[in-house]
Amino acid sequence: MLPAVKEAKVLAATPVKPHIPIDRTMILLAFTFAAAWSVTGAMAAHMPRILEAGGATAVQAVAAGALFGPSQVVARIIEASFLSRYHPLLSTRLACVTHPIGAAIFAVVGGPASSVFAITFGLGNGILTIARGTLPLAIFGPKNYGYRLGLIGAPARMAQACAPLVFGLLIDMMGRGVLIVSSALSLSALAALCLLRQRPRPQ
């Protein structure tokens, strides 16, 4: 085999790292998912403690925690059956407001609203798990989808890993007031989503 032909085959078999510019849309999406998943990581670790700090009894906190998983399943069914008719940007925006709504209800009502808080947060989180994959696909298209998704998701993975420790310290200082921080993160994610456009970008 000629050396030039052999070299060409080796180069063809070698994976080429795609060049994907980190533009404004990429940054907004990365921030959105980092903010949203930091709330997810924090609530997964500390929800019962936060609910008890807000006046819930141990029974109410445990009952609320048991509703979190089923509410995520319901959200995914809604996403697949109804919200799939619309652009993923709409469902992602809706998912970002459920946590602040639940937190506001819990702040006003107290312990008896623990289940409402868990359900509303679970609904939003269930949709976000789907939107993490569908929204970048809808905006950028399928080209280099996996690599782009990895870039967008890297800050979210780091934020989710750090959130339990950070929120644990905040709960010690703020008690249930930590829901102000988590709600602000969710609303900042919503603000970032409002700056995005819906149409796929040309490749």
Image (cartoon, helix red, strand yellow):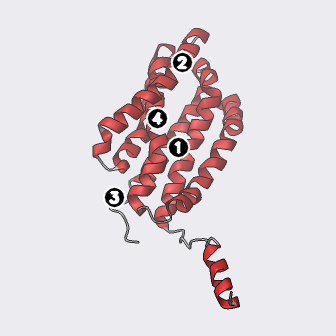
Residue at screen point 59% across, 31% down: 43
Q: Element at badge 3? A: loop
Q: Residues within 10 Å of mark 3 (few under 14, many from 20)?
A: some
Quadrant where the N terminus sits is bottom right
Mark 1 touches mark 2? (CB < 8 Å): no
Given residues 135 and 171, the one toward you in this image is 135
- Label 1 vs label 2, nearer the camera: 2
Disc ID at residue 126:
4
The vertical placement of 150 against 67, above or below, is below
**Disc 2 versus disc 3: distance between alpha carbons?**
36 Å
Residue at screen point 42% across, 63% down: 140
Q: Amino acid at mark 3?
A: Gln
Q: Amino acid at mark 4?
A: Gly
Quadrant where the C terminus sits is bottom left
Residue 153 placement (x, y as % from top left):
57, 53
Q: Amino acid at mark 1?
A: Ala
**Disc 1 versus disc 2: distance between alpha carbons?**
21 Å
**Disc 1 versus disc 3: distance between alpha carbons?**
20 Å
Residue 180 in which image quadrant: top right
Q: Element at badge 1? A: helix
Q: Element at badge 2? A: helix
**Disc 4 versus disc 1: distance between alpha carbons?**
12 Å
The residue identified by callout 3 is 198
Disc ID at residue 36:
1
Residue at screen point 57% across, 49% down: 34
Q: Residues within 10 Å of mark 2 (few under 14, many from 20)?
A: some
**Disc 4 versus disc 2: distance between alpha carbons?**
15 Å
- Could you tell me if residue 107 is visible in this image? no
The residue identified by callout 2 is 66
Question: Which one is earlier in the sequence, the residue at label 1 or at label 3?
Answer: 1
